[in-house]
Structure formats: C-alpha cells, structure tokens
Amino acid sequence: MSEGDRTYDVVVCGGGPAGIAASVAAARTGAEVLLIERYGFLGGMATAGLVNPFMTFYAGSEQIIKGIFQEIIDRLSAKGGWGGPQEKWAFDPELLKVVADEICLESGVKMLLHAFVCGADVQRSRIASIRVFAKPAERKIKAKVFVDATGDADLAYTAWVPCEKGRSGDGLTQPMTLNFRVAGVDIDRMPSRDEINRLYLVARSEGRINCPRDNVLFFFTTRRGEVHFNTTRVIKLDGTSARELTAAEIEGRRQAKQICDFLRADVPGFENSYLMTTGTQIGVRETRRIVGQYVLTAEDVLSAAKFHDGIARGSYSIDIHDPAGGGTVIKHLPPGESYDIPYRCLVPLNISNLLVAGRPISATHEAHSSLRVMPIAFAVGQAAGTAAALCARWKVSPRDLDVKRLQRELLDQGASLSKVAAGKQSKGGQS
C-alpha cells in the first residue's frame, strides 16, 4: 500500500517537545501514529534551536509537569545527560536526540524525518490529507486526526484556521535568538553576572558590540568549562518568512561572533575560550497563534486560573522580550501558584479533525510568553496526542471529545492536573 492510499489514526506534524509527547501519547493510547519532522532528528528548539536549560516545571515545591516529560528526564539522567555542576535542569541536546528516537520507536511511533509539511486539502471543514515534501517528491498523507506541533501553526494556517501573530497594535513578535555555547572557560574565575553585564554595556557603548539586548543572559551546561548564551537578539523579523529567517540567521551569527570576541577580550575566565557551537537554527520565540475555542489571557496566567477542562499546568512567568528593543518585561505568578491550560485552547474553531500543541495554541501575546517554554510544550503535547488517539478510536471530533475521559487518561499516564481539572474540587474553577 502506498503512503497516499493508507490512513493513519494520527499524524503529528513537528517533532519538537510538543510533537514528541503527542506522538508517544497517541501511540501508547492505541493509535497508529506517523510523526513528520523537517530535520534529521527530533527535539525542535531543544536540539535544533539549542535552547537550554528547561525552564521551571515546579510551582513552589510541587512538580506540576510530569508524565512523558519526566520520562524524558529519567532517560537523559540514565545516559548521563541531565543536570550539571552549576545548572540542575541543563540537558545534553545530543543525548536528547537519542532519547527522543528511543521513546518514539519503543512506543510504536513511525517517523518520517527530512519531511516538510507544505499544504492541506480541506474538505467540508475537515483535513482530508496533507501535502508533505519528502525526497524524492511531494506526497499526500491521510489521517483520521492531525496534530499541529510545528511551533508556527504551519498546518493550521494552511488549513485556513484563523491565526494571530505578535502583539496588538503593530503585530511585532518577540525577538529571535541564536543560542550559542562557549567552551574553554575557567568557570572559577568568572565575575558576577552584574559585573559581566557592566562590562557588556561598556563594550556596547564603545561600539564594539552591536546587539539590542540590554544584558547578558547565560546558563551553564551539563559539562564544566562550557557556558551557554541566550544573548543575541534579532528584532522586527518574522519567523514565518524564509526571507526574513535568512536575514535573522545571518544577523544572529554576526552577533554571536561579536559577543565571543568581547568575552575573550574583556571578561576574566574567558581568555582562552572559543565558540563551540551555534544552534542549527535560530531560536524562534513567537510566530502564529491559533484562535481556538478559548483564548488564554495574561489575567488567566497571573491569577493562576483553574479550569474544569484543564489538561496541563504552567507556572512560568510572563516573559516578554521587547519586540522592538533591548528590554524584557517579567511578571511573576503568586509564589507557589500555577495556572491551567484549558483543552479548548488546543481546539481550532473551524477544522473538525485538528488539534494544536505547543506554543501556537490559542492565547494572547502576553499569555503566550509564559506557555511557550519547553516543559509546558511537553505537557500540552501529551494532552493533544492522547486526545487525538481517543478521537480516532471513538470517531468523534476534538470539539466533541469527552474531556473528563481525556483527563482520566492523562492522570493514568502520570500527568499532573490541578484539583479542579482532576475533579477533586467542585468549586473555585472556571468553566
């Protein structure tokens, strides 16, 4: 049987954190799953984008993201790829590629790498098939239910799902960042973060650094002597345009080289350092967001809102890197609190067999700045994949799925839900 003649239960487009979790969850729920990924490896921003470490998956002392995400951590830890001498949530991106392969294959996921989703055939508000370019030619792939985990809502957009992009007013998105790593660093001689920032601002004022960011953001890795930088800032370019992505990649490399030169010349401990690696692609914080059955807001995030159809939890702050400049706006949740992500945020308005996972789910620009981080993407992806498998099994559309049954399945998988979402509390949540 050729690819165009068969129909999968679930096809997941995009193999980043959301896509990995969605594929594994769907396969473990009994679906025949195909995972499509444009690179030759899985991991998305965690590998191709070199984003590190994982942002918080705790609310106070409570771990709020578990399930498949915790299994990823356990597998990384067993291979020596989790945690480091200075960064407890750092991970080895090369080992994550291996772990992602293993967990998908062991769960029964079929993978098609080096494949790019380029269109959708929509019939009567349903995706009949998608168009995928994979050598040697373009092909059509069919599924009962599709999951868009592309990070940019590429499938949803080509299927005419209403989408928004950027902040209200001018439509500018959060800036892109080319992550890079510097090796050969004498960690013990590094000055404080405040002193590094002071030196950076001096170099910038002297014209030796041309980067909009107002400070140096760095983390440590799983290995001593390496420092991970999330400092380059490329503003006013669109991550859904190949032409503008080209310009962003070139500008990101220019900034990375300039910052490395500054480090060697000005910062103690970096005298013998060198640029070890840059991301395979520039890190994209924000592009499209679908308009779904519910739009998560900043008020929902900051008030730690709970929902009866909650399928994932988040506690990361609202974190908006200035789309037009160098600053960053951070607003924290109350200490120890978390918010729910409603299932309705994954369900687009006008396509009956599509779910969206990861950062393009239905939210405002401000709420998106919190939910965009990788642990939350894993949690949302696990929910989307489980939902897709149940919809395929029961022959129902995502909008008609019994959410309580979905939540029970997620709890059985070890996912963490709030008391309201888990049905342990009859009051205090929102419908």
Image (cartoon, rainbow, N blue to C red):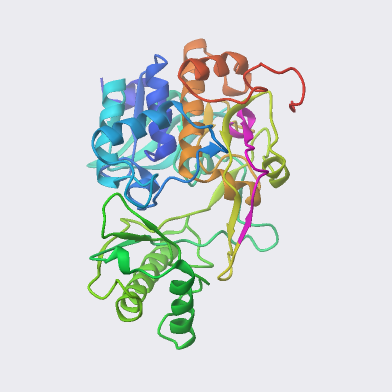
In the depicted structure, whether residue 160 falls above or below residue 328: above
Where is residue 197 shown, x and y percent of the image?
47, 73
**210 or 218: nearer the eye?**
218
Whether residue 364 is visible here, answered yes or no, is yes
Q: If the image is split into quadrants, where does the N terminus sit?
A: top left
Residue for point 56% across, 43% down? 371
* Position of residue 92 measured from the top left corner of the image (x, y, whole percent): 29, 46
Q: Residue 37, how many percent across, how many down?
A: 33, 40
Q: Residue at x 57, y 39 (%)?
A: 361
Left or right of 150 in this view: 345: right
User: The C terminus lies in which quarter of the figure?
Assistant: top right
Give residue 183's quadrant in the image: bottom left
Say whether residue 32 is magenta.
no
Residue 100 appears anywhere in the view: no
Q: Magenta stretch containing residue 332, yes or no? A: yes
- Magenta span: 329-346
Which quadrant holds residue 81? top left
